[in-house]
Amino acid sequence: MRPPPPITGEVAPGFEPVRAAFEQAFARHGETGAACTVLLQGRTVVSLRGGHTDDADTQAWQPDTLLLVYSLTKGMTGLAAALAVSRGMFSYEQPVAEVWPEFAAQGKQHITIGQLLSEQGGLAAMDLKLTLANMGDQNTLAAALAAQAPNWPPGEWAGNHAYSIGWLASELIRRTDARRRTLGRFFADEIAQPLGADFHIGLPPSVDRARLARIQGFAPWRMLLALDTLPPLMVLGMLWPWCLTFRALNNPLLWRGPGALDAPAWWPIENGGAGGIGSATGLATVYHEFATGGQRLGLRPQVLQALAAAPPPPRRGWRDRVLKTGLVYSLGLEKPSRWLDFGSTPAAFGTFAVGGSFAFADPALGLGYAYVTRKLGLYKWNDPREKPVRDAVMACAARAGMENPR
């Protein structure tokens, strides 16, 4: 058996258990390449990395390593929308059709922006067959989404909008921004650049492709061997082309599974649902800003309060129509619940991603957290590589808070 790769980076005094948990992800749970960053009340208390960025195990993970982070992108999209609300571009209470009149087609005229961003609008699966060509065309995508009939009566349920949530948010921003910027450009200009956050929704040509860790994916059939760790009805739905689950998660159709999105041709596409590329530090930096008042971005307190608040539930309760499990969505993010418990209080918000990555903000502690991995695991969430690291972070942060109250 090969020895586990060395772990590099630093932890602040009092956060040594986080390093131990991170090391165990490699030694006991098969991690091959990962990074974890935690910012707490203005200082970096965890900055760890380990393993390799390639399948040949020749390139060690570096401080500036980037990677595709799938649905962690949704969190950055939700925060970009929150910034747009802070800037007065639109409001969560406003009907989508007020800023995007064509969206009113097919009975969608009463859907509010908050409802849409909370994945209750029923646009998880698109009739448009998504391809490499049209996924980069915001005009085509916006027209298709405006004409799309909802997958369920809006407000009845919520369900994972795996890809569409990013293009929906992008059109809201583009319609209300004086410069007509799309989501990726707005995020780069208004969030990433001011914060110095190494995260991209649509990878620009200026970024050296050699910095990217390559995803170690899995064949779709392997999900059948993981019915004890994945929602069984979701797995079965992935095998039935007429099922909403299949239509939402397999469009574009990726026969090699989600790892197929990690290809140079896909990286430049502004896919705000699942195509963001960045570092653990970039993610944690953005979440930390939103967890500590957002002064550098000029965030309004009312918007931060909306992100922290308990969201209005769908009329038929919190059961994801796509993932076939309980999950609470709010304004482009996920909230703590009995199904997915994270953060020190219900005010936390963040997103998990296919394969084991997780990132969130904890306003009660003033904390931004991110764990990213290149090896896609087969767990609904609470991957055994990431969860012990998160638990150790929370325990150490709680002790630090008692010793140094805010």
Image (cartoon, rainbow, N blue to C red):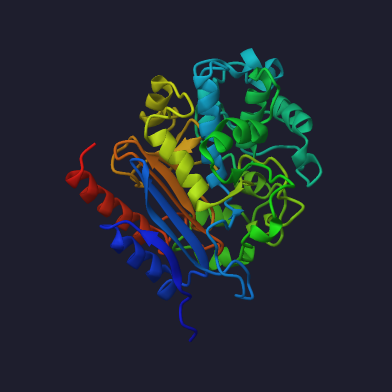
Q: Is residue 311 left or right of residue 17?
A: right
Quadrant housing residue 40? top left
Q: Position of residue 204 (x, y in %)?
A: 71, 44
Q: Position of residue 300 (x, y in %)?
A: 43, 21
Q: Residue at x 50, y 29 (%)?
A: 156
Question: Farthest right residue?
Answer: 133
Residue 119 can be seen in this image: no
Residue 400 can be seen in this image: yes
Q: Residue at x 57, y 38 (%)?
A: 192
Q: Is residue 183 left or right of residue 283?
A: right
Q: Is residue 378 left or right of residue 45?
A: right
Q: Image height check: is 304 above or below 363?
A: above
Quadrant housing residue 123? top right
Q: Position of residue 234 (x, y in %)?
A: 54, 52
Q: Image height check: is 115 above or below 66?
A: above
Q: Position of residue 13 (x, y in %)?
A: 27, 58
Q: Nearer the viewer, residue 171 or 404?
A: 404
Q: Image height check: is 291 above or below 9?
A: above
Q: Residue at x 76, y 40 (%)?
A: 136
Question: Farthest bottom residue?
Answer: 1
Label tally: 0
